[in-house]
Image (cartoon, coloured by chain):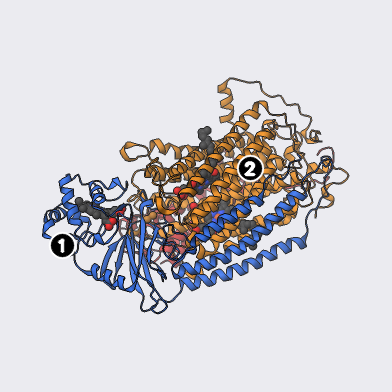
Chain colours: A orange, B blue, C red
Amino acid sequence: MADQPVPIAGPLEVAYPTRGTFLEWLHSWVTTVDHKKIGIMYIVYSLFFMMVAGAEAMLIRIQLAIPNNHAISPEMYNELFTMHGTTMVFLVGMPILFGLANYIVPLQIGARDMAFPRLNAFSFWLTAFGGFLLYYSFIGGFGLYGMGNAPDAGWFAYAPLTLRSFSPGHSIDYWAAALILSGFGTLGTAINIIATTLSMRCRGMTLMRMPLFTWLLLVVSGLTLVTITPLTAAQVMLLLDRYAGAHFFDAQAGGSPLLWIHFFWVFGHPEVYVLVLPAFAVANEVIPVFSRKAIFGYPAMVAASVGIGFTSLAVWAHHMFTVGMSAAGNSFFVLSTMVVGIFTGIKMFNWLATMWGGSIRFATPMLFCIGFLFQFLIAGLTGIMLAAAPWDWQLHNSYFLIAHFHYVLVGAIVMCIFAAVYYWYPKAMGRRLSETLGKWHFWVFVIGFHMTFDTMHFVGFLGMPRSIYTYEADRGWNTLNMVISIGAFIQTIGVLIFAWNLVYSYFYGEEAGSDPWDAWTLEWATPSPPPVYNFATEPEVRSRRPLWDIKHPQDPDWKYEP
Amino acid sequence: MQQQPGYSPIRYMLALAFFWLMAITRGYCDGPQATPSIFAPASTPAHEIYSFSFFVLAITGAIFVSVASLLVYVMIKYRARAGEEESEPPQVYGSVQVELAWTIIPVLIVAVLFLTTARIIFAIQDAPEPKSALNVTVIGHQFWWEFRYPQLGIVTANELHIPVSSKQHPQATYLRLLSADVDHSFWVPQLGGKTDLIPNHPNEMWYQPTATGMYVGQCAQFCGVEHAKMLIRVYVDTPEQFQAWVANQQKAGVEDPKVAAGRHLFETEACMNCHTVRGTAAKGTFGPDLTHLMSRSTIAAGAALNTPEDLHKWIENPANFKDGALMPAMQLSDQQIDDLVAYLTTLH
Amino acid sequence: MSTVPLFTDESWQMPSKGKVAMLSLIIGECGIFGIFLAAYIFYLGHNLSGPTPSILDVPVFNTVCLLSSSLTIWLAERAIERGEIRKFGALWGLTILLGLEFITGTALEWYALIYRDGLTISTNLFGTTFYSLVGLHATHVVVGLVGLTTIMIFTLLGKVRQEHAHRVQVFALYWHFVDAVWVVVFTVVYLVGR
Ligand code: HEA
Ligand code: HEA
Ligand code: CUA
Ligand SMILES: [Cu+2]
């Protein structure tokens, strides 16, 4: 069944160009406007930065493993956690989601490319230069003793710490400039995805037949439009304060540092949903395929995603329960935040219902998705605890908070990224990733993950705040921190197995064929890797699972879908 | 692919429950602790938050147990068995009733959670300030705390003294939170939640401590290089101890002719530009008030002990303890520093 | 699935990708303007010293010009749709003139504020928020004018034909947006805020 040719794979004979020199090869990538190549570049770029930011996390954990440690200077530590957070969010989470979108969306909707291929390439390079500019600060920033100095004010960069009086030098300028640059790239790609999904669908692909992956990326892109722009605006204000003598956040002139906090979280909160919705998107593809069942409650899934998108615009101040809002203000944000939990619950239950009555196969992508379900459940519930404002007065900025968001960011998002790579690697490379290595990767990573991040909740309860480069030996945090650090090293081993798998399977992996997972969406109708033009003939669909219809002509989906 | 679901949530649930218990039971002994656990409350708002947290824990815990068991059940019950590879299970596309059910139940849960949360928020935040309340103004500086008692005319630093509250003599302390430079956050877990100190945005919080002793906490909002060494000590005193402390703090700086050399240095070197010693020419306000330095057991916001040796090392070069402290190393000779320390150690 | 003919009608129509993209861009721009507007409103009356919004003169003529440019560009769009290229060129040129008038008006206003009233971006909070908000809008007008002029040049070179109507309309959306934002900025800065 798996290799059964599907008509739209088509009669066109593909003449792959013969291998040229290295320069030709490089040239072909740098100048490409093909959505698949750009997608791969995005993904490679973000996996690279995942290693970098992960290495930064390791340095953080080395410093915190024992109390009063001197492995890393305070200045360096602050740079490390700022760069770790900023990198993970802007150079890993965002680009990888756009990479997946770039690769998968046109294939899933039966299009031959994105709506604006050149804008697409331009956006990628903007994002890429943004990232490299940020890292150039390590050597190029104007720091103490002429050394470089990277941004060191946290990924939230609270003014007035970021104003010139408290952060002389250029570290903050790198932060602002790099993110403004990559922000424009992000905006461009988001616009591109919206235009692609709304205007490039193949015949029969109505909105309500779009694969959920594509739907969620549409929602994400819409959310990105109104998320990344406030950050850009706030960063422009910051730069005006720093260089044009403006007073937006300058307390001396009556400016309000509180305003920055609002502006940042007006961006920052929707941003975390921008990051998590693509993870949901991956789960939406993987869980049905490996449970061998159609997704349960497709319309409810779409509605819940759109609901999350809109609600997430009105919850930002749950990051600000301790800034001294009125009791009524606090209560409002408690409510709006918890409402997001209802929408998310709908998704959770629909996934469970999809698995219910299925025939579940525990291949590596599914393993990661199950890990995701379990961990996301916990992460969401700790989110609800944080949303209970009085408790948040205790938990805010403690390691409990760090644990909450790593549970989502690592336990949900990174897990789904792994799932996505295992799931689509065969499509992109023509070879499967090794299942054995995959299982090792999963188990090692999950064990490390739980050692690290479960434990973080407890040091949080015991009063350990975030962003501290060291702590006193008598606080009772020593053992727990050691466990956290060991867990982090185990995670690193897991990630290294993954990296090895990527390389190894590229050369020695099992040939994948066009449809290794026996899946149902259009990307699996193309050869692996798909030719430049994707589809020989433009496909037509009449249900959400076009390949199911082909594989089960006697019992097609369109008979049942409402 | 005949694998067991493998991933064993049950084990994790047990481990988790165990850890929760550990963390929680730590708090069951009363009074101050070396570990500032939020589960060892010793003051009114902290108590309220503590009981509230169990309510939230119970609800989220129940949700966790039900959903996680469902997940485990589904994984075991519906795993692919031998012989199923070639057939597909029956396809189900959705059900409106079921969707409604799992929308409405969470709505109800959220309603309950929200109403309770709002009640606690109002109870703590809008509690009327009693007339007898002690007022303290807390000013956050980059890497140290300034405490002013406007009713008592006291200025001190880093170590806060407040009276205990009892049934017979309820005594609340109201903190007014200001910042001199960047954002900070005042957090002493056993006494209450944290509140930020934001320039141009005065905030307020209150304590009503129920057990005496020394409580530790620290700045909880990243505020620069030495954010990690911006520790807080709160001494909850019996009324008598507090009175004695107040009486001492209200005196001017002690004069001792034996340390005239040190005092002279203090008033001729840069020290006096930044520090105040009441009753002398030193009236600087950039650094902590040193009038009663010896009444504190640590210096530099908990970065070092208040001993002659540590004082010596501190004055020699503050970076010995605190790399980014905003006090310069003044390149003094050992003899000069010894004189200074001798002077400082008379400031009881 | 070419093997299974599913659709016989030719009614499969998607929205124009240009318009979708431009509307998306506009939504994004709203985010930027929203933040600057929020800052302006937040700081109304928070000035510690220096000039206050009461020194502003209401730029009625400017506003009329900018708003009527929306009308002229709309007429131009209709003209090109019908293939009346000369009429299109004339109306397009008129739009540019109106836009130029607006930007000149802003420049004169700023000149007066700086040299008569001594208000710069660093004077006080009013200066900070006023120049950044109005400046943000003016930047958009300038960008719009550059675009308008480019199309004008092509028109004069005779390169613009009826089949470009769609692209011209997509670009015109942007200009309409710039005008619409002015209505909001104008209301906040000159009507409510003064
Ligand atoms: C992708 C990332 C992501 C996601 C998805 C979430 C999801 C949620 N987050 Fe999280 N959060 C972060 C990333 C994320 N968060 C980050 C990075 C920070 C810190 C930033 C910083 O300070 O640096 C943060 C901080 C943060 C805070 C601020 C804490 C503080 O600073 O003091 C709060 C408070 O309300 C919060 C709450 C929530 C809630 C309620 C959800 C909800 O969306 C969760 C919803 C899910 C569920 C509830 C589980 C499934 C639902 C059911 C099984 C149904 C039944 C449930 C109910 C009826 C309740 N988060
Ligand atoms: C997607 C987002 C994401 C991810 C995946 C992670 C992953 C990890 N994070 Fe991070 N983290 C954040 C987002 C993320 N984090 C954010 C936003 C903050 C807040 C920052 C702030 O306050 O400003 C933060 C802060 C933060 C802190 C708090 C710092 C502080 O407040 O003082 C800590 C402390 O332990 C930490 C640890 C870890 C660890 C151990 C991992 C592990 O999961 C990492 C696992 C390891 C790897 C993924 C890579 C390993 C590979 C190698 C080492 C390869 C070697 C190198 C080469 C081959 C080149 N993170
Ligand atoms: Cu003060 Cu952190
Ligand atoms: Cu949030």
Q: Is residue A137 above or below residue C192?
A: above
Q: From the image, which quarter does the N terminus of chain A lie in?
A: top right
Crowding near the residue tagged with mark 2, few <14, some 14–19, many ≥20 C-alpha atoms within 10 Å: many
Q: Quadrant of residue A62?
A: top left
> As drawn, is B177 to the left or to the right of A381?
left
Task: Please provide percent x and percent y for residue A30.
Answer: 56, 30
Q: Residue placed at 56% from the left, 65% from the top?
A: B54
Residue for point 68% across, 34% down: A436
Between label 1 and label 2, give the one nearer the viewer. Answer: 1
* SS state under label 1: loop
Q: Could you say where residue A338 lies in the image, as x and y percent from the top left?
A: 59, 62
User: Which quarter of the rendering shows the C terminus of chain A?
Assistant: bottom right
Q: Which mark is residue B280?
A: 1
Residue placed most toward the observer, A78 or B312: B312
A483 relative to B289, above or below? above
A469 vs A103: above or below:
below
- A359 relative to A365 in the view: left or right: right
The kind of residue on which mark 1 rests is: Thr
Q: CA distance from mark 1 to mark 2?
A: 70 Å
Q: Is residue B49 left or right of residue A437?
A: left
According to the picture, the residue beneath numbered tag 2 turns out to be A101
